[in-house]
Amino acid sequence: MPKLSEIILNNGIILNVQNTEKIAVIKELAQKLIEQNLISDTEEFFSAILRRENLESTGIGQGVAIPHARTSAIKNIVIVFGRSQTGVDFSSLDGQPSHLIFLIAAPENMKTEYIMTLARLSRLLRKSEVRNALMAAQTSNDVIEIIRQYE
Amino acid sequence: MHKILVYFEPRTKIDRLSEFTMSLARQYHSQILALTVIKPPSAQKRNKVEEERAWKRLYEFEEDAFQYGIKISLLLEELETINQKTLTGKIIDIASVYRVDLLILSNNAKINLKKLANSVTMPTIIIPYKNLNEHNERKG
């Protein structure tokens, strides 16, 4: 099982997301995967992500959202990360906007790894010191180092 | 029936609970709130493993709901001390805060069923975690 710090893309970190609306933010993050040719079928990828967003609140509270999908449009499990100073409404049950947004994409056949990645990341992000450190991170390397340190 | 709160414990078997809840949610086009409760980091040494197990169980449940096209939200709550009294109180509180229309849990949940029955304000369904036939076969 790969570590979170190994599957978060160094070139997939946006320290100041430009958009403020949920779907637009997800597309902004997904663009990082497209730029790196990690998605074979963009339409299928967005469809998988958005289908889930329509059914679930991927905002897990405490300013964190983890939009996620399993799709045949990707070959390996990856994480891209975006940070929003203003916050984005991910319909979290606690009513708080999400500032730390982790997009997880996994192939259809990696269900176990996908579930474990979601579980590990969710656990990690419940720690206030991790959230605070991620909010203060200055570079992409800082983000990866924080994840590595706490996982 | 808009909202169904389903409670389960991270370590227990939930096949029947899951099957029943999904079936009801599909029938009534309900949203599911899936709840599990763990101790806070300060209260247990193996919190990392416990918490990951809890999240894993929640996301497995979510994945099943997603396959059926059911709306779902996940809730992981913490309790300093987990016993029948505190756990029962927490479930009642959550059900009330989120104004759920139905509460579903299994009879293997470590709760005080009498207190629950006397305190809940919404219909509640208790699912036997064992199939009755299985139970009789073992007895016989």
Image (spheres, helix red, strand yellow):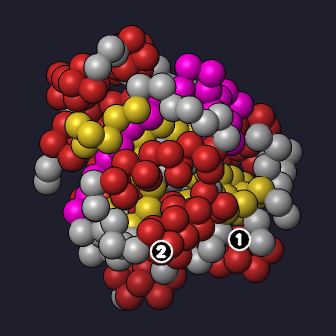
Foreground mark, 2 or 1, reads: 2
Estimate how packed mark 1 is, as few (under 14), some (14 to 19) or many (20 or more) residues with alpha carbons within 10 Å: many
Under circle 1, the secondary element is helix
The residue located at (27%, 54%) in the rendering is A36
Q: Quadrant of the C terminus of chain A?
A: top left
Q: Residue A86 magenta-drawn?
A: yes
Q: Nearer the viewer, residue B52 or A138?
A: A138
* Quarter occupied by residue B72: bottom right
Estimate how packed mark 2 is, as few (under 14), some (14 to 19) or many (20 or more) residues with alpha carbons within 10 Å: some
> Does residue A114 appear anywhere in the picture?
yes
Residue A65, compared with residue B131, is above or below; it is: above
- Three-letter code, disc 2: Glu
Residue B85, compared with residue B13, is above or below; it is: above
Left/right of residue A149 with respect to residue A73 in the rendered view: left
The residue located at (32%, 14%) in the rendering is A138
The residue located at (33%, 31%) in the rendering is A124
Q: Nearer the viewer, residue A49 or A122?
A: A49
Q: Which residue is mark 1?
A: B25
Residue B40 in the image: state x and y as whole percent.
Answer: 41, 23
Q: Which residue is mark 2?
A: A44
Residue A53 in the image: state x and y as whole percent.
Answer: 60, 57
Q: Nearer the viewer, residue B37 or A61?
A: A61
Which chain contains the residue that carries disc 2? A
Residue A27 in the image: state x and y as whole percent.
Answer: 53, 51
Under circle 2, the secondary element is helix
Give the residues in magenta: A76-99
Q: Nearer the viewer, residue B101 or A53?
A: A53
